[in-house]
Amino acid sequence: MNEEAITSAYELLRASVMTYRGEPVGTVAAVAEGGAEAENYHDCFVRDFMPSALVFLADGETDIVRNFLRTVLRLRSQHQRIHGHQIEPAVLPASFRVSRDEAGKERIRADFGDHAIGRVAPVDAMMWWVILLNIYCRATDDKGLAIEPEVQRALRGILELTLREGFEVFPTLLVPDGAFMIDRRMGVYGHPLEIQALFYGMLVSAIELLRDTAESHDLLVLAEKRANMLRNYVQIFYWLDLERLNEIHRYRTEEFGTGSVNMLNIYPESIPEWVVDWLPARAGYLVGNLGPGRMDFRFFALGNLLAIILGITSQRQAQGILHLYQDRWEDLVGCMPAKLIYPAAVGEEWIFMTGSDPKNVPWSYHNGGNWPVLIWALVTAAIKTGRQDLARLALDVADHGLSRANWPEYYDGRAGNLIGRRAHLRQVWTAAGYILGHKLVEDEGLLDIFGAVDQREQGV
Ligand code: GLC
């Protein structure tokens, strides 16, 4: 372990704490250095706070996590009508910020995607909030928070919204582009894996947290059914290994009615060339997205790692994903854990997929950049799968240079050896993810912190 790096990471984490009415309520995305930070990096993002929260809980600093959970909930009252319609009241904000006027008067303002670049809806925020609430309750024995009427109401609201009947025939959740960590147009609309893993984690957590009353009974039954269907569906249809690739390669298409094998009508012609050479015989992964006639074969790291952590994969699949990391280490980790998606979209595909986004050029940012925040997820998934060797290896890689580079948000290049061209420095989830990764290898007992969302792990 690199003691100096840990000290520096903690300094950054402490400096990032945001207060409201004298209480700590969250951490800002990046701590300004007088540079040209994007305006919204002074916000506390719900997803960014997750690794910070886990570090605070592991250190017994529970107040900030409780205050954060409460603050996010209260901010729902700031929902606004946009052009004659309203965002669902159950939707939680992507981020919030505290500002102070000259007289020192504080104001807290939430962003429900109505201010975000590209105006994206943060569907993941409500999932993270429920998952964190459950982890908080388990880690602190503070059962009081979960049973507060406002919290129970919010849990019901989130379940009602996500379990509502829509236009869908699948158990997965349909979301717009950029509804999660990849909050830009990157061809991630539809049924992206990360949202499905979070949806599952949220359902399982909500089932634990919601009291069985006349008001919630039917919802609980529905949530239980949906969680089971979702897990089976993801394990069967998102899974890709060589055996399955062979099946898809020889798929019959245009099958009508019941009893079809190629239910989603995936054309074998859509299998990209890279995947055939790239997929090792002993490995596998969950594909990035799935819909009618559409299988997005790209490897999405956070979706796969969360699927292991939140228990939606089978044991065998978790092993397969870690084998993929081992056999394709250069591609998926390289010089900095870990690659966000593999491979990058290039040429015309980049033009059509991103709308010519200069921040998402090939092997940069969301389009194949390396994001050190993923360290915590990689380490957690590896330890959970019994691959401590890979967890340590990932930390070794991160130990070299991350703090010296001043905690960049992301790295560029196929190997992730260049500090991201437009990366913020002093990025807080980078530092928190690094601390958490080290904490987890030193004390595997901390994995129990995820116990809440981890119990019903079963395989097909
Ligand atoms: C970028 C990331 C997003 C993150 C935000 C703040 O927009 O894509 O996931 O929450 O920065 O760090």
Image (cartoon, rainbow, N blue to C red):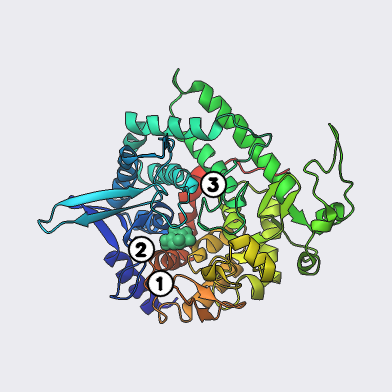
Decide which of tag 1 and tag 3 comes sooner along the chain.
Answer: 3
Decide which of tag 2 and tag 3 comes sooner along the chain.
Answer: 2
Residue type for callout 2:
Tyr
In the structure shown, which secondary structural element does the residue marked by tag 1 occupy?
loop
Q: Are marks 2 and 1 in contact (CB under 8 Å)?
A: yes
Q: Quadrant of the N terminus?
A: bottom left
Residue type for callout 1:
His
The reply to whether residue 89 is in sight is yes
Q: How far apart are marks 1 and 3 (CA)?
A: 26 Å
Mark 2 highlights which residue?
41
Decide which of tag 2 and tag 1 comes sooner along the chain.
Answer: 2
The reply to whether residue 148 is in sight is no
Mark 1 highlights which residue?
424
Q: Is residue 143 left or right of residue 99?
A: right
Mark 3 is surrounded, within 10 Å at the Cα level, by few (under 14), some (14 to 19) or many (20 or more) other residues, namely: many
Q: In this view, does 410 lie to the left or right of 70?
A: right
